[in-house]
Image (cartoon, helix red, strand yellow):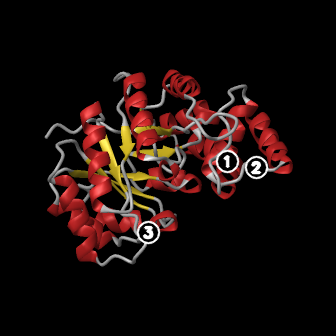
Amino acid sequence: MSTPDIHGIIGYTITPFSADGEHLDLDALGQSIDRLVDSGVHAIAPLGSTGEGAYLSDLEWDRVCEFSIQHVAKRVPTVVSVSDLTTAKALRRARFAQAQGADVVMVLPASYWRLSEAEILAHYQAIGSSIQVPIMLYNNPATSGTDMSPELILRIFNAVENVTMVKESTGDIQRMHRLHVLGEGQVPFYNGCNPLALEAFAAGAKGWCTAAPNLIAPLNLELYAAILANDLERARALFYRQLPLLDFILKGGLPATIKAGLRNTGLEVGNPRLPVSPLDDGACKQLERLIAALS
């Protein structure tokens, strides 16, 4: 299997809605994708937490998936989140994304019931055996309710041929160190926790999956460039400069903060879909100040 070189800054896209929240705004989605690609991000990741994939109907999900892949048009790789509550639904999404030309699919084992390790492994095996594109295993217990230990992640990595990369979002840097040691440095891993970006790169992360480039792409890219140049002093300075905004994005909720931030830059993308609420006026003003301080 040919695995694309997924590295650096992987930018998450939002899913824009009309003012009433009832309809997709694909024109705004195209503009947001162009902004990210033109900024220099190394990959685009639609339909994740930032993209509100869990809040879309099947038809909406398909339209956003197809449009995003076609609009990116191979300018950079696409990493499409295909997670769903059941294996059958995640399988359908994975196959659809593959058919549209996704370079990688990302799988988070979301479930209402607590899953056993055997059930999690079977979930990845079912998806892996049904598609030919690489899979990014995604661990984020805060959103999925399922926490995979480094030992289980390595077991899945070794058992499912096209699970070729891992995104870790627990915010525990020791997980990344443990995965590196257990996998003898052979497991490409990616950071999904904004405030952990500097430590994750220092621990050997191959990339940073983040919504922040929607608002501060140059700073994110400069940080990665400093890491590549082994200029740790500059990397630290760049990281701590953007840390207040990274913390705000995480605590304020990705769809709400990124949509408010894009509105602040002149791109109207609607509000998050209920029950998620938009930022209140006070939070919007705080976000505006944080962005202004970085410009």
Taking the spot 45% from the left edge, 53% from the top edge, the residue there is 191
Position of 37 relative to 182 (above/below): above
Position of 14 relative to 34 (above/below): below
Q: CA distance from mark 1 to mark 3?
A: 29 Å
Amino acid on which the number 1 mark rests in the picture? Ala
- Residue 77, percent across and down? 35, 31
Is residue 190 visible to us here?
yes
> Which tag is nearer the camera, tag 1 or tag 3?
1
Q: Are marks 2 and 3 in contact (CB under 8 Å)?
A: no
**Residue 279 numbered mark, or none:** 2
**Residue 26 numbered mark, or none:** none
Left or right, residue 164 beside residue 45: left
> Which tag is nearer the camera, tag 2 or tag 3?
2
Left or right, residue 141 beside residue 266: left
Q: CA distance from mark 2 to mark 1?
A: 6 Å
Q: Are marks 2 and 1 in contact (CB under 8 Å)?
A: yes
Q: Which comes before the other along the chain, label 2 or label 3?
A: 3
Residue at label 1? 256
